[in-house]
């Protein structure tokens, strides 16, 4: 068979032959694709910025990795053999900028040439602002009420101020930093507790950490009360003498712990006059002495002195 005959035979029905070859190639391609498997996992995202600039918005901490290849290959790839990063260090000014998410293979992943790796998202679009540092006063957020009869006299925060840093727009208008809630419900004595600082924005950070110590001084409530119609009692009067009935309304102003004062009744408070020196009938001016339970302070009372009339018993 000469060359011409071979050529004619090869070109006979050539459209059909081309279609057959193309179909075979497509079948081979689809077979290869269908025999590959995918695996998904997340890896940490490492971001790099200019030393004086940081993002002014929340940034993703991880990205999604999709690896595609033969089942026996992708099973051997460890998650820490894939690194993801985005570099914004070239942007030394404020504005919105884009940077691609770069993938770096390590370990076994480097040895598989047929391994296909994709990342989501493929690109980051971030607002970049200048880095700002500011010292702010710490204000405790106190909730609840102490046990009845007790009160919080004062409280302290250590340290009383902290350094906070972040993007310019998030820092420049801040005046103070608040703590998370400190509950003083049912407290009856001094106490201290560690409490976390509340971030005004999740992108902010504290130079010395976000934990401070809250200390409170809890003391019994001290109250002042006025008592009217307090009884006057004559003591140590000679048995041969008697005293004319006291006339008037007598009062005292007392101070003490509320819970202690609530335990007493009016008869627990009185005045006394010492008659031990009186030996015969007559009129006398005697000092009035308050007689109150222990722990109670007398602030004022009336009268300080009283005129008494002493009579002889017939």
Image (cartoon, rainbow, N blue to C red):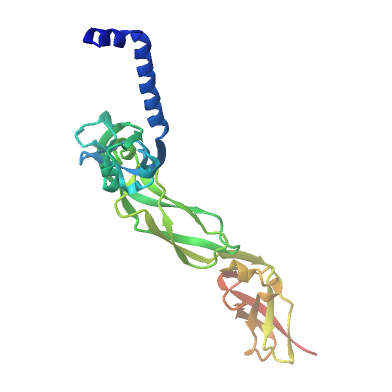
| Residue at 70% across, 91% down | 238
The tally of labels here is 0
Estimate the x, y position of residue 125 in percent, counting from the top left. 31, 30
Given residues 2 and 68, the one toward you in this image is 2
Q: Residue furthest front?
A: 1
Given residues 117 and 53, the one toward you in this image is 117
| Residue at 33% across, 36% down | 117
Estimate the x, y position of residue 4 in percent, counting from the top left. 23, 7
Q: Residue furthest right?
A: 314
Given residues 24 and 248, the one toward you in this image is 24
Estimate the x, y position of residue 223 in percent, counting from the top left. 57, 64
In this image, 86 relative to 29: left or right?
left
In this image, 123 relative to 237: left or right?
left
In this image, 101 relative to 258: left or right?
left
| Residue at 27% across, 31% down | 99
Given residues 205 and 264, the one toward you in this image is 205
| Residue at 25% across, 11% down | 1
Q: Is residue 218 above or below residue 166?
A: below
Q: Is residue 256 above or below residue 135?
A: below
Occupied quadrant, residue 82: top left
Occupied quadrant, residue 9: top left
Q: Is residue 241 above or below residue 85?
A: below
Q: Is residue 165 visible?
A: no
In the rendered view of the protein, which quadrant contains the C terminus? bottom right
Q: Is residue 151 visible?
A: yes
Estimate the x, y position of residue 154 in percent, counting from the top left. 45, 60
């Amino acid at each position: 068979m000469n060359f011409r005959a071979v050529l004619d035979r090869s070109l006979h029905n050539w459209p059909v032959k081309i279609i057959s070859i193309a179909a075979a190639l497509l079948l081979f391609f689809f077979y290869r694709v269908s025999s590959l498997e995918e695996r998904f996992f997340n890896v940490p995202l490492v971001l790099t910025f200019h030393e004086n600039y940081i993002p002014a918005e929340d940034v993703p901490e991880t990205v999604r990795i999709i690896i595609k290849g033969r089942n026996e290959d992708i099973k051997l790839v460890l998650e820490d053999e894939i690194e993801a990063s985005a570099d914004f260090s070239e942007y030394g000014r404020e504005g919105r900028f884009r940077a691609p998410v770069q993938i770096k293979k390590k370990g076994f992943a480097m040895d598989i040439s047929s391994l296909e790796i994709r990342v989501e998202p493929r690109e980051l679009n971030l607002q970049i602002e200048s880095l700002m540092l500011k010292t702010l006063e710490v204000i405790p957020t106190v909730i609840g009420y102490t046990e009845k009869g007790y009160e919080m006299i004062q409280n302290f925060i250590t340290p009383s101020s902290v350094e906070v840093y972040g993007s310019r727009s998030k820092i420049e208008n801040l005046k103070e930093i608040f703590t998370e809630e400190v509950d003083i419900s049912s407290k009856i004595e001094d106490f201290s507790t560690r409490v976390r600082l509340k971030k005004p924005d999740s992108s902010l950070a504290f130079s010395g950490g976000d934990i401070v110590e809250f200390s409170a001084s809890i003391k019994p409530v001290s109250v002042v009360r006025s008592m009217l119609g307090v009884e006057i009692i004559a003591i140590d009067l000679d048995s041969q003498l008697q005293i004319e009935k006291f006339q008037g309304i007598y009062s005292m102003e007392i101070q003490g712990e509320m819970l202690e004062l609530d335990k007493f009744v009016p008869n627990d408070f009185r005045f006394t006059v010492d008659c031990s020196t009186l030996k015969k009938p007559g009129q006398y001016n005697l000092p009035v002495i308050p007689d109150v339970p222990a722990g109670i302070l007398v602030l004022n009372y009336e009268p300080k002195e009283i005129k008494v009339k002493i009579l002889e018993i017939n």
